[in-house]
């Protein structure tokens, strides 16, 4: 298995992973599956804004996808990114998520980002523990912040400081 930047050729498999998560998990808070054009626009937007989309591949198959992007749109948040990682079901427990997370964190650090945010369904204990292994800490819980599959979902926010830089100069 290797981790590399995603390309448009990966989009059909990325779409399959994404839509499977939409259908079966409480991790993506929408019930609307996307089209290939939706995923293409997402990839081009991420790449066009200097953000990263990575895939873990083995024998030409995409096992998982990881990315980060805008946390909030106001300029004061420009050093903060929100990330996501999704794997094919058969790729779980094989170190794919670990490889993607390590590469994603390294990339965000290299690009000078200061804080990485994870937004997680509060009942997803596996994801919370996974993030803790990389140094993420719980920064708060928003009760009933989302609704999917006929139920309210609580949102856990986890954060990882990517550097120990002092505040950037005024006007940065």
Image (cartoon, helix red, strand yellow):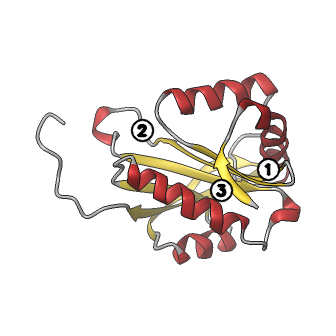
Q: Whole-percent x and y of residue 39?
A: 72, 30
Q: Residues within 10 Å of mark 1 (few under 14, many from 20)?
A: many
- In this picture, residue 76 sits left or right of residue 41: left
**Residue 73 location, quadrant:** top left
- Residue at image position (84%, 35%) is 12
In the rendering, which numbered label is found on residue 21? 1
Q: Of helix, strand and loop, which one carries label 1?
A: helix
Q: CA distance from mark 3 to mark 1?
A: 15 Å
Q: Of helix, strand and loop, which one carries label 3?
A: strand
Residue closer to the observer: 11 or 73:
11
Q: Residues within 10 Å of mark 3 (few under 14, many from 20)?
A: many
- Residue at image position (19%, 36%) is 172
Sequence-first tag of 3 and 1: 1
Q: Residues within 10 Å of mark 2 (few under 14, many from 20)?
A: few
- Residue at image position (61%, 72%) is 130
In the rendering, which numbered label is found on residue 13? none
Which residue is labeled 3 in the image?
A: 153
Q: CA distance from mark 2 to mark 3?
A: 21 Å
Sequence-first tag of 2 and 3: 2
- In this picture, residue 42 sits left or right of residue 140: right
Q: Whole-percent x and y of residue 52?
A: 54, 42
Sequence-first tag of 1 and 2: 1
Q: Of helix, strand and loop, which one carries label 2?
A: loop
Q: Whole-percent x and y of residue 98?
A: 64, 68
Give the tally of numbered discs: 3
Question: Can you see residue 32?
Answer: no
Q: Quadrant of the N terminus?
A: bottom right
Which residue is labeled 2 in the image?
A: 72
Question: Can you see residue 152?
Answer: yes
In the rendered image, the vertical position of residue 6 relative to residue 44, given as above or below: below
Q: CA distance from mark 1 to mark 2?
A: 23 Å
- Residue at image position (17%, 58%) is 166
């Amino acid at each position: 298995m290797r981790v590399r930047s995603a390309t448009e050729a990966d989009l059909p498999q990325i779409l399959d992973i994404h839509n499977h998560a939409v259908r079966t998990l409480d991790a993506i808070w929408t019930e609307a599956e996307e089209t290939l054009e939706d995923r293409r626009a997402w990839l081009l937007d991420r790449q066009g804004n200097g953000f990263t989309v990575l895939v873990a591949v083995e024998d030409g198959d995409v096992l998982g996808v990881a990315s980060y992007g805008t946390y909030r749109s106001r300029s004061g948040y420009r050093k903060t990114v929100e990330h996501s990682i999704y794997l094919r079901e058969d790729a779980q427990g094989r170190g794919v998520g670990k490889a993607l997370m390590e590469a994603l964190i390294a990339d965000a650090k290299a690009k000078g980002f200061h804080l990485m945010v994870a937004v997680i369904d509060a009942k997803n204990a596996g994801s919370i523990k996974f993030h803790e292994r990389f140094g993420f800490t719980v920064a708060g819980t928003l009760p009933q912040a989302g609704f999917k599959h006929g139920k309210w979902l609580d949102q856990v926010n986890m954060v990882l400081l990517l550097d120990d830089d002092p505040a950037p100069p005024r006007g940065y």
